[in-house]
Image (spheres, rainbow, N blue to C red):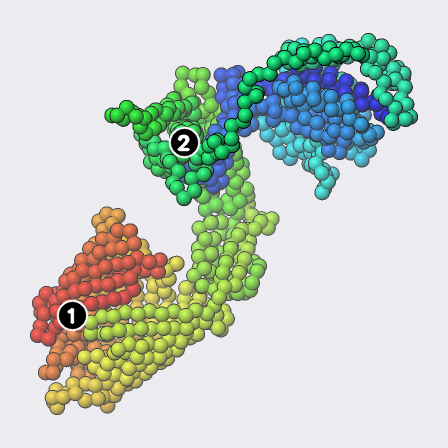
Amino acid sequence: MDAARAGRARRAGLLVARSVDRMGRGGGGADRAARPCAVAGRADRRRSGRLRRAMGHCRGLSPLAWARGDGRRRSQAAGRDRAVARLADAAGRVAGGVRHRAGLRRCAASAGAAGERTGHGAVGIAARAGGLPGLAVDDRNGGMMLLSILALAQAAPTEPVPAPPVLGALPKQALPERGCAAYLWAMQDQRFVAMVEPGRLRIMLDGKPTDLAAAEAGGGGTLGLASTTRYAGAGVTATLDMTITQRETLQDGAIVSDASIRLTRGNQDEIVVPVGGLLAKPGTAPAQGPSLPQDQRDGSADPQGNAPIVPDAQFDAALPPLSGDINAPLEPMSSMAKDQPAAQAIPLPQTAPPLPNAQTAQPLATGETIGAIAPEDPQLAQPLTPLSSFNSTPLDTAADAKGQRAPDIRYDMEVRGLAELKLDDEFKGLSALREGKGKAANATQVSARAREDEQLAIRLMKSLGYYDATAVSTLQREGTEDGEAGRLKVVLTATPGRLYRLSSITVNAQPTVPTDLVRSNLPLKVGDAIEAARIEGAEANVSLVLPQRGYPFVKVGQRDILLEDQGPEPVGAYTLPVDTGPRSSFGKLTTVGDTVFDLNHLNVFPRFDEGQLYDSRLTDDLRNALVATGLFNGIAVEPKRTGRMNPDGTEQIDLQVTQTKGPSRTLSGEGGYSTGQGVRLQGSFTNRNAFKPEGALIASVIAGTQEQGLSGTFRRSNAGRRDRTFQVIASASHQNYDAFDAFIGTVAFRWSYDSTPIWQKKFTYAFGGELTGTNESVYDFTRGDRRRATFGIAAIPGQVVFDQSNDLLNPTRGYRLKLNLSPETSVRGAVRPYARTMVEGTFYYPFNDSLVIAGRARAGAIFGIDRDDLAPSRRYYGGGGGSVRGYGFQRLGPLDPQGNPIGGRSLNEFALEARYRFGNFGIVPFVDAGNSYESTLPTGKDLRFGAGIGGRFYTNFGPLRVDVATPLNPRPGDGKVALYISIGQAF
């Protein structure tokens, strides 16, 4: 063994012992660091009667965090709605101001920066020197420390390699003219390594002084310096954590009793440097100074702390000579003890008294004989019990009960104190006891659930402003009539305490237009309860309204609520920082991603002009219009700053449209059945972007018992203007009904401004042109029989709709007005012009949340032509699922002598429904009335009534409708019952 190595190992052991001795006597830095930090040094210093809670900024489902320290309590909460407050499952976690001794001890052995954050630098140095990195010292367990010391002393250490200092030594520094500065020395080697000013950290990196600017600060502040500050610059990020303590003995400064600097540089490992020092007022700082506060330097905490260490030469000379023969016997310890100088004894932790030495016989002398053996215990001479007589069956446990149901403990629960606060429902929805459904494996599990529910009740009460709330649970065993133990009963008693209210409201924000924009949209007032949902909702309103008023980049900061619980009334002072960002106006559109639409077509969609004050609702409107095209898998519209300023002082911001291409081809189908019309199925194929941009090609086929047909449609959506559609249609069909049998061919074009399920408009219109050729069966009254006739029809149809309803497919309130006008010409041997008109009104009145009363009235008239000169397919008929239910399709109106409908030139219809909905289902009783007439105008006479009941199944694309009706005043030949199946409401 090398003598030098042995000497260093001994000295390392003494250092560990001395450090452990300091900790055992309460003089270590850990005890001082564990004390709550007293916040002082400000003119507005608040005593222990002030409680500070900082409720964190709302971000979804974030918890509330509470902390206590020297009479202060801090609260941080996040989230924007009521659910966040009541679901704040981590509201009781301790964070911020409380420091635990175990939590304050961090090993900083990486990169040569050994030592603990608590100030026991010697422990870390000794651990490194002795070849035991990461040595853990627990001052609560003397036995563990002793074992660590013995292991260190007996280990075969290697030659220690001095670690290069992480930070270089700073030269003498001058204080700023104003404010204080902290001077920090490395705990490892007493070098002056850092100077801290408000907003700046100066350290020595790469041989030159480097200033890092403060990027973020947190925690309580003392003399202008925060307890935790992050600095950045020169490719380095440094985080300084320090505890500043003011003492009466220091008139011009304070003590930095516990601190560390964490350095991160590029992809290198993080380095932690334990430091300590002083806080001084303006003056000149020494180049080298005290490395620790006075009470740690003068040895007052440890009388032997400054005793000189034995010099190396003296220590090596005291070591016994070592033999080169490894097989030589070891020297006796007694001889080593005689040669060793008297040394200070290392105090050992108090342990139990040693056990008495075992009494053994004296060794026999040469020639001495063994005495007589005492008689044996008679029990020892007995034969052993045979193994077969033992019961080796193991005891049954819950884990061994295979194929059997383990026994359960049943319990009941009672909650007291939450009903008065209207928290019962929220508690029941989150309770661990209720989730267990009254069953548990054992009483310990019941107790654990009860403790979890205690914390839940406290969090719920705090969410309403009862920040002194407590909850206690007790377990009781209910007895039975036969005296046996019964079910467990858990009684949870919640005590809310006093309700805290707002004493003041302060908003820190940049100037806005108008000046009170932020405060007027923060719906809080003095005297309101400090309720999490109310406060989060008010802040969410600021985040919602300001982007609608020209501030798209507003950021609501972390709120701060300073609570006072020592006054006559519990109150809190509320402060909210708001970064409004620049007041902005609309600029240009830009696009990234897939080029589904180019910029020319994108500029068709906005409803705003360049230079108009920014409004987030118009941005959302642009996004919804792009979604309605159905051509995107994803679409995003985001404001981007440009720095371009308008004469009114607003900044132009561009809207960046991010396009993600979606499928453009779809197959769709629909079907229905009604009495008189039979089964009708329709399928279609659509390529929505066959002719870019938004030029759709649609092919449709109709297959039914009484109607068959084919059609092709070209449709250009957003044609030159947003929401305007141009269509060209070509179709051929065969319709065979009681009223007529027709073969119809049509070519038409149509311009329209239509509603969609995503964007329902109040005003829509349509107009176009139509050419139709038809060959139909017509009843000839002169011949008394049917014959076929060919008609040529030219029409210019138009439609106007005014819609004040709340839904396109399933309205529940509002009304609609619709007017159709179609000037037409019928060519059948002669040209006969005429006009077809129709007016319709519907209303929807919500009687309550489940019941809607709906009504409809419709009237039509055809002017300028006799009925018999009009093609049967262009006449008006009544009856069917969209007309008067209870009668067959087109069965109402004049009849020919064969009993078939021949239609008329006028029509009137009325309907009344009571739509009752429960969940996804509904029941609809209804009454309909109407008829068609040969005259030009409807007379209102001879009305036919039908009544029935319908069922509804509500889906995300509209209700599925099944109606059954019967005629109330039928004519000969009318059916008894009519059935109608389709999608969507009747009107």
Q: Which element type, helix, strand or loop, lies under badge 2? A: loop
Residue 229 locus on image (x, y percent)? 64, 30
For the view shown, which residue lies furthest in the right direction?
324
Coordinates of residue 271 in the picture (x, y in percent): 71, 34
Q: Nearer the viewer, residue 299 or 723?
A: 299
Q: Earlier in the sequence, mark 2 or mark 1?
A: 2
For this view, does 852 lie left or right of residue 489? Answer: left
The amino acid type of the residue labelled 1 equals Tyr
Q: Which mark is residue 887?
A: 1
Residue at 49% from the left image edge and 52% from the top image edge:
612
Query: Which marked residue is nearer to the observer: mark 2 or mark 1?
Result: 2
Q: Is residue 553 above or below residue 749?
A: above
* Residue occupying image coordinates x 73% and y 16%: 18
Q: Is residue 251 visible?
A: no
Residue 908 lies, in percent from the top left, at 17, 68
Q: Which mark is residue 658?
A: none
What crowding class fits label 1: few (fewer than 14 Cα within 10 Å), some (14-19), or many (20 or more)? many
Kind of residue at disc 2: Asn
- Element assignment for label 1: loop
Crowding at label 2, few (<14), some or many (≥20) Cα neighbours within 10 Å? few
Left or right, 851 with reference to 490 = left
Q: Nearer the viewer, residue 860 or 356?
A: 356
Please give left or right for residue 526 compared with residue 809 in the image.
Answer: right
Q: Residue, x 16% and y 76% (percent of image)? A: 904
The quadrant the C terminus occupies is: bottom left
Can you give x and y, in whole percent of width and height, for residue 358 in the image?
Answer: 67, 13
Q: Tell me, yes or no, if residue 887 can be seen here.
A: yes
Marker count (numbered)? 2
Distance between mark 2 and mark 1 Cα atoms = 69 Å
- Which residue is tagged 2? 442
